[in-house]
Image (cartoon, coloured by chain):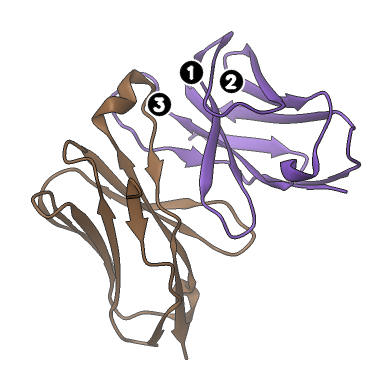
Chain colours: A purple, B brown
Amino acid sequence: SQTIHQWPATLVQPVGSPLSLECTVEGTSNPNLYWYRQAAGRGLQLLFYSVGIGQISSEVPQNLSASRPQDRQFILSSKKLLLSDSGFYLCAWRNGANLQETQYFGPGTRLLVL
Amino acid sequence: QKEVEQNSGPLSVPEGAIASLNCTYSDRGSQSFFWYRQYSGKSPELIMFIYSNGDKEDGRFTAQLNKASQYVSLLIRDSQPSDSATYLCAVRAPRAGNNRKLIWGLGTSLAVNP
C-alpha cells in the first residue's frame, strides 16, 4: 500500500529564516505530487505540482520554491520566510499512471512564522 | 462567482439524523467530483468520489451528482458525533489539463450533537 510522509510535523521559525519541508511517498512510482497551503480559516491553496523528477509548476507567485530531486521526494523551500507564510502545509500525491484523479494527503506540517 | 462553492456552516444536526452537505460548481464541463473530510488539525481524507449523474452509496455516505444543475451533495445517514468535521468538495475541471488539478471549495463545518 502507498504511504506519504511529511516532516517536520510542526515548525516555529523567525521571520527571515530559511525553510525546508520534505515530503516522501512510498509504494508507488512516478506519482504526481502537490504542495498545498491551508491558512487559518481558509481553503486549500495549490502552491506547486510536479509530474516528474525536476518538473515543477508554480501556481502562485510567492517567496516559496519547490524541487523534486527524486521520483518520490518533493521539497518545499524558502530563503526568507514572511509572516504570511504561516499555515498548514500539505503534500499530496496521485497515481500518475492512470486517469484516477484522487489525491491523497500526507499528515501535514504546521508552520508558524514569528 | 467562485469556481466551487460550499456553505461554510456550521451545520448542526442531532445524532442519528441525516446530514446533507451541498456543493455547487461553475464550470459546466467539470468531470470528476470528490468529497473529503478534515478533522480539526488534521489533513483531508477522501470519503468518496463520483463521476456520473445520480447517486453513489458507500456505507452511511451517499454522493449525489446533478450535472445539469451543477451541484454535488453528500448525505450522511445516522450521523455520529465522530462525523463532526469540515467537509471539503473538490472538482476536476477540464481546463486543468494533464496535471490533474482539483478546484477546492472552502468546506462546510458539520457538528453532530449527542
Mark 1 near mark 2, Cβ–Cβ under 8 Å? yes
Q: Which kind of residue does numbered mark 3 sit on?
A: Asn
> CB of mark 1 within 8 Å of CB of mark 3?
no
The first of marks 3 and 2 along the sequence is 2
Whole-number angstrom distance, CA of label 1 to CA of label 3: 8 Å
Q: Badge 2 sits on which subunit?
A: A
Q: Secondary structure at mark 2?
A: loop
From what the image shows, is residue B57 above or below residue A59?
Answer: below
Using residue B4 as the reference point, say whether residue A22 is left or right of it.
Answer: right
Q: Is residue A105 above or below residue A62?
A: below
Circle 3 marks a residue in which chain?
A
Q: Amino acid at mark 1?
A: Ser
Q: Residue at x 43, y 67 (%)?
A: B8
Q: Which residue is mark 1?
A: A29
Residue carrying label 3: A95
Inspect the image, locate mark 2, and give the three-letter code of the amino acid beneath it: Arg
Locate residue A48 relative to residue A40 in the image: left or right.
left
Q: Provide residue A40's location: percent of width, then percent of height.
A: 64, 57
